[in-house]
Image (cartoon, rainbow, N blue to C red):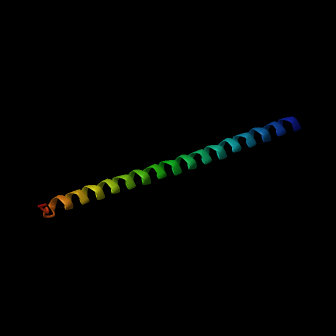
Amino acid sequence: MEVLVALADRIAAAREAEITLAREQDHEAAVRVRSERYKMLDDIRKRIDKIECEMSSAASPKKHRL
């Protein structure tokens, strides 16, 4: 009987370890996705700023060289 209890305890511990590992992996994946989203948004903001700068340069009066 003690052997069965010990085996059940080992199985429960193994399952708990699997659950903990899965949670850690999910957390790491969520952090990675969040980081990728922030980088993507930052890239989009930089592109928008560049386009706005180009548009304002194109709209400003051109200086003629002699």
Residue positioned 25% across, 60% down in the render: 53
Residue 16 placement: quadrant: top right
Along the viewing direction, whichever of 15 and 36 lies nearer the viewer: 36
Q: Is residue 38 above or below residue 10?
A: below
Residue positioned 59% across, 45% down in the render: 25
Along the viewing direction, whichever of 46 and 3 lies nearer the viewer: 46
In the figure, is residue 60 to the left or right of 3? left
Residue 21 placement: quadrant: top right
Residue 1 visible in rendering: no
In the figure, is residue 33 to the left or right of 25? left
In the figure, is residue 28 to the left or right of 65? right
In the figure, is residue 29 to the left or right of 55? right
Along the viewing direction, whichever of 12 and 26 lies nearer the viewer: 26
Residue 58 visible in rendering: yes
Q: Is residue 13 above or below residue 59?
A: above
| Residue 62: image location, x then y, percent | 13, 61
Q: As drawn, which residue projects farthest toward the front?
A: 66
| Residue 14: image location, x then y, percent | 73, 40
Q: Is residue 51 above or below residue 29?
A: below
Residue positioned 34% across, 56% down in the render: 46
